[in-house]
Amino acid sequence: MEQNRTYRIDTHMHTIASGHAYNTIDEMTRKAKEIGMDAICFTEHAPKMPGSCGILYFNNLHVLPKEKYGVSRLFGCEANIMKLDGTVDMPQSMLEKMDIVIASFHTPCIQASTVEQNTAALIEVMKNPFIHIIGHPDDSRYAVDMEAVVLAAKEHHTLLELNNTSLKPDGPRRGARDNDLKMLSLCKKENVCITLGSDAHIEEDIANFTRAVALLEEVDFPNRLIANTDFELLQSYLRK
Ligand SMILES: [Zn+2]
Ligand SMILES: [Zn+2]
């Protein structure tokens, strides 16, 4: 797989700690070095995802060096949205200590609801200053009012993710391509920043943005609105 040379930051990856991913932190870091990455983000599934690690795993993330083999490493989680009021499965006191936090809808953790309710839930999540990214908001199983989501992301300085794994033709996230095209068009119009996430569960998928980049090209999406092009730009969202 040919890694993309423009986007040297990956904001969404999993290791064996997530329970259904297959490399270690060290293996992922070595691979990132090998393919020329500047920074990688370890966003393990938070505890309510069946098979993922427990709260103590996240409590001890501070022991990990923030740089190894010349690659910057950010440690956080992909929290599960548990309730329509925006509650996630990670205490606020823990979120505050993390470098990067994604929050996503996942089928083992919350039932699909109406468009209005799903949208309201994402907006409540974005109000949390310690949640930086909405993960794969492109899943028709959790259909949202994309315009409302994009405007809320602008207001609350939250990144919307373009998730490469969502775009797998045989993947479970329905309607992702159409929803992502809609999201990109609205973000371009409203000057709202996105982030590319590989959602890698194996080292070979680090910075695999192949399908995402095809969509970016389709809508002629500007690099200045992509957090993966500039570490400072990304940092501005992590300090929101
Ligand atoms: Zn996810
Ligand atoms: Zn993920």
Image (cartoon, helix red, strand yellow):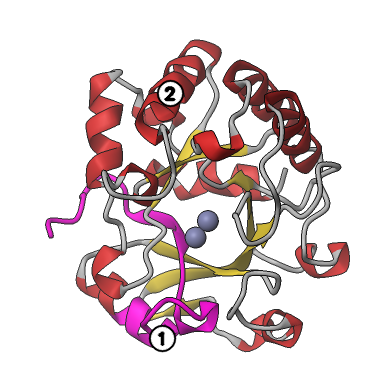
Would residue 68 be found to the left or right of residue 60 on screen? left
Q: Do we see residue 69 in this rendering?
A: no
Identify the residue at horizontal 59%, vertical 30% (top origin): 143
Q: Nearer the viewer, residue 46 or 106?
A: 106
Mark before the other along the chain sequence, 2 or 1:
1
> Which residue, given by chain and number where applicable, does mark 2 sit on?
184
Q: Secondary structure at mark 1?
A: loop
Residue sitting at the far top: 189
Amino acid at circle 2:
Leu
Identify the residue at horizontal 30%, vertical 39% (top origin): 212
> Which label was assigned to residue 54?
none
| Residue 79 position by quadrant | bottom right
**The N terminus: image quadrant:** bottom left
The residue carrying mark 2 has its beta carbon less than 8 Å from ligand 1: no
The Cα atoms of the two marked residues, 2 and 1, are separated by 33 Å
| 29 in the magenta segment | yes
| Residue 206 position by quadrant | bottom left
**The C terminus: image quadrant:** top right
> Which residue, given by chain and number where applicable, does mark 1 sit on?
24
| Residue 203 position by quadrant | bottom left
Q: Which region is colored magenta?
A: 1-30
